[in-house]
Amino acid sequence: RPAEPLPLLRRLLRRIRRGRNAVRRLRLRLAIRRLTRVIRVIRRVLPRYGATPGLLRRYRQAHGYLGAAYQLRGNATRAKAAYAVMLSIDSRSRMGRLSSNR
């Protein structure tokens, strides 16, 4: 199992929280921009570190908040796409179990 890049994970979590806070304040364009950047960073570092549980967790979190931002903006297509990525990362999540029982 690859080692977790802990300093990077902490930085990503701070950025995700900033995106989440923008969603909560309904500053949705800002939230989308911030969360999209986080996703880009994670995609860029995945080849270097591998799919560690921490990176996958951050990737899932960023997509979840990105989906919420798009949903609140009324963009159902992009919201569904973000949620689909989020659910595909960890099928053991509660939402994953609920959606797979249909």
Image: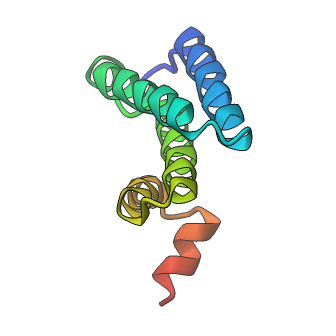
- Which residue sits at x=48%, y=90%? 102
Q: Nearer the viewer, residue 84 or 67?
A: 67
Q: Nearer the viewer, residue 82 or 2?
A: 82
Q: Residue furthest left?
A: 47
Left or right of residue 99, residue 43 in this image: left
- Which residue sits at x=57%, y=42%? 61
Q: Is residue 101 above or below residue 52?
A: below
| Residue 77, image x, y percentages | 35, 63
Q: Is residue 47 above or below residue 21?
A: above
Q: Nearer the viewer, residue 68 or 44?
A: 68
Left or right of residue 25, residue 89 in this image: left
Left or right of residue 2, residue 68 in this image: right
- Which residue sits at x=50%, y=36%? 29
| Residue 1, image x, y percentages | 43, 30
Q: Residue furthest top?
A: 7
Q: Is residue 16 above or below residue 101?
A: above
- Which residue sits at x=47%, y=80%? 100
| Residue 62, image x, y percentages | 52, 39
Q: Is residue 57 above or below residue 38?
A: below
